[in-house]
Amino acid sequence: MSIDIAIAGFGTVGQGFAEMLALRQGMIREAFGTEARIVAAFDSSSAIYSEEGLDPMALVAAKAETGRVGDEPLVDGAAFLESIDYDVLVEVSPTDIVTGGAGLHHIRSALGAGRHVITVNKGPLALAFAELDTLAKENGAQMRFEGSVGGAMPIINLCRESLMGQEIGSVMGILNGTCNFILSRMDDGLPFEQALKEAQELGYAEADPGYDINGVDTACKVVILANSVFGIDCSYEDVDVTGITAISEEAVAMAAEQNYCIRLIGEISPERLEVSPRLVTKGHPLSVTGTLNVAQVNTDLAGPISISGRGAGRSETASAILSDLLAMMRSFVNNK
Amino acid sequence: MSIDIAIAGFGTVGQGFAEMLALRQGMIREAFGTEARIVAAFDSSSAIYSEEGLDPMALVAAKAETGRVGDEPLVDGAAFLESIDYDVLVEVSPTDIVTGGAGLHHIRSALGAGRHVITVNKGPLALAFAELDTLAKENGAQMRFEGSVGGAMPIINLCRESLMGQEIGSVMGILNGTCNFILSRMDDGLPFEQALKEAQELGYAEADPGYDINGVDTACKVVILANSVFGIDCSYEDVDVTGITAISEEAVAMAAEQNYCIRLIGEISPERLEVSPRLVTKGHPLSVTGTLNVAQVNTDLAGPISISGRGAGRSETASAILSDLLAMMRSFVNNK
C-alpha cells in the first residue's frame, strides 16, 4: 500500500516539495511502513500521470529543461484530476485572491471526490474556507494548509494539537515577512521608500509590492486563522485592513524613544479581525526583526504562547506541506 | 470506561492540575467520549484512594483546610501506588536533582507496573532519563514530561509532532525565567545584586537562588531535551555549565552599545551540551525580556523555529500536564 500524491502547480514550491519527498522517503517508510509516491503532477499547460509512481527528481529535471512538467497537454486541471486515481492533492498553483483561480477548482474537485487536500494556496482558503471545510467533512476528506499562514512557522498545528486543551482568546501575529523587513530597516533609520527599494533588490518584495505593503496578504492569513482556529465563517471583506505605507520616519523614531517598535500586526479574535501597524515593546516576542513571521496565541490556562519561523522560501514552505503530509499519514495509520 | 489518574505530590502544581481537570471535564468527555478521573492522590504524609473517583475540588479544599490531601497516613508512596489500581501517574512531588527523591521511586513503580506517567519533576528525568525511558518501553507505557522544560512553552511536543519531518541540528533556549528576569533588569541599568534582590521580592527567585543563577536548573532542562529530542544518553555531569553571577554592568552596557543583550542560553546538539551567558542580537527571537522562556529549534528544511511561553506558574505548569494528558488520550483513542 502507498499514499498516492497528485501535485497541482509545479512552480518553485511544487518542485521543492517533490525534492523533499525524495529526500525523506526513507524516513517515511520507517515511520509508517508505507511509501508516499507522486503519481501525477501538472502545471498550467502540461500534465503527467503514472499509476506506478513518478520519479520526483525526474519531474524537477523535466521542468527545468523544457519548462513543462509533463508531455500531456493540459486544458483543465480539475478535469484531469477527475480522470486519475490518487489519495492526496497537493495544491500549490498560483494564488488568486480575487476569484480563487484554478486552485479553487482543483480543491473542489479533489474534496468532492473524497480525496484529501494539502494546500498553501491562500486564495481558495481566504475566499471559500467554510464551503471547502464543509465539502471536506461531507466527503470524509482532510484539508490541511499549514504552509498557507507563516510558511515554516507551525501556527495552525500548534493551535490544533499542542494547545488542544486551551481556550484561545486571540491570535496576534506578524504574518508578512516583506512588511517586517521594511519596518525593521526603518528601525535602523531608513525612510519607507528606501527600505522598500532594498526589499525589492533583495527579492523580498515584488516589483508591484501592493499585495504585501497594503496589508492584503496579511488579511488573507487573518481570514484563514479566523476560520480554522476560531471557526469564524468570514472572508477577506470582513477584515479591517491598514497597511504600512503611511508610516513615517518620525513615527518610527518617536516609538523607538519610548522603547517601542512599529510592526504590522494581524489580530484574530471572536470580536475583532484587523490588520494594522501597532506599537510593540522591544523585547516582546512580537518585536522580531527581519523577514521572520511570528504569532502569539493567547490562551486561558497557559497564558501567551508565541511561535516564529521563516514566513517564505521554497524549502520552508515545502517543509510545511511535508509536515501536513506526515500528520495525515499519522492519522491514517492510527485509524486503520 | 474512564482514564484513572493518581497524583503523587499535592502542592501548588498538583492542586492546580486537579482544578484544571475539573474545569475541562466537559471538553474531555466531548473530545474523547470518556472521562479522566482522579482516583488517588498523596502528599508527603497522607493519601486517599477511591476506585469510584474523587472530587478534585474536595481534594483541594481538604488540603487547604488540613494541610493533608487524605485521611490515610502515608509512609511509602511507591508502595501505596503498588496497592491501588490506576492508568496514569501524574508525578509532581518536590524536585531533588541529587538523588531524584521520592519522585524517582514513584515513576519507577508506575512504569514497572505498565502505568503511564506524566511528570514535571526534573530530578528523576535529569538523573535517570535513559533508565526510565527503557522501563517505559519494556512495559508498554508512555512517559510524558512537557512541563518539565519551559513550563507552558510546548517545546517537546513541538519537536516530536509539528517538526516530525525535520532533522533537528540543535536547540538553543532560555530555559530559566529567573535568570532572564535578572538579565532583563540589568539591560535597564541595574547591577546584578539589585536585579537579584528585585527578583526575590517579586517571588521570581528563591531565598537561596543558587539553583537558578548558577545555571543548575537550566542544565537539568538541557539534559531532558538532549535525552528526549536527540536521544543522547546523558545526565547532569555531562553539561558544561556557567551561570550568570559574573556578568557585570559594564559587560551588559558594552553589549547594548553593539545592539546585543546578554542571555543565559542552554545549547543542546549532538556535539555540545552547554549552559552559558551569550550575546544575542536585539530583535532576535531569543532576545525576549522578563520571565519568559524561549527555545529556538534549528531544523534542516524549515530553518529556525522558535517558541516561547511562561516558564513557570501554577496554571502554566498544570496546563502542560493537561496537554500531555490530552495527547495520551488521543493516542489511546487512536490505538483502540
Image: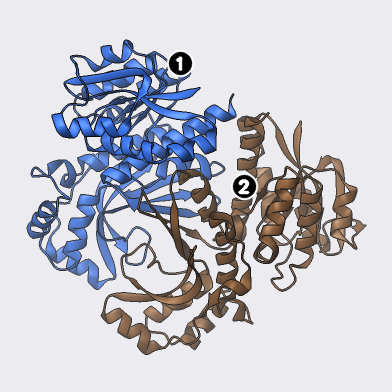
Chain colours: A brown, B blue
Q: Which mark is residue A324?
A: 2
Residue bearing the label numbered 1: B138
Asked if residue A15 shows in the view, the reply is no
Question: Do labels 2 and 1 touch, CB within 8 Å?
Answer: no
> Percent x, y for residue A3?
74, 38
Place residue A51 in its image quadrant: top right
Q: Chain of mark 1?
A: B
B154 vs A304, nearest the viewer: A304
> Percent x, y for residue A128?
70, 63
Q: Secondary structure at mark 1?
A: helix
> Percent x, y for residue A197?
53, 84
The residue at 26%/20% (across/down) is B48
B222 vs B112, nearest the viewer: B112
Residue B196, placed above or below residue A33: below
Mark 2 nearby-residue class (10 Å; few <14, some 14–19, many ≥20)? many
- Discs 2 and 1 lie in a common subunit: no
A142 vs A208, nearest the viewer: A142
Mark 1 nearby-residue class (10 Å; few <14, some 14–19, many ≥20)? few
Q: Amino acid at mark 1?
A: Glu
Residue A326, placed above or below residue A156: above
Residue B285, placed above or below residue B299: below
Q: Chain of mark 2?
A: A
The residue at 8%/44% (across/down) is B207
Q: Secondary structure at mark 2?
A: helix
Asked if residue A332 shows in the view, the reply is yes
Q: Amino acid at mark 2?
A: Asp
A274 vs A37, nearest the viewer: A274
Q: Which mark is residue B62?
A: none
How far separated are the C-alphas under marks 2 and 1? 31 Å
Relative horizontal placement of residue B232, taking residue A227 as reference (left or right): left
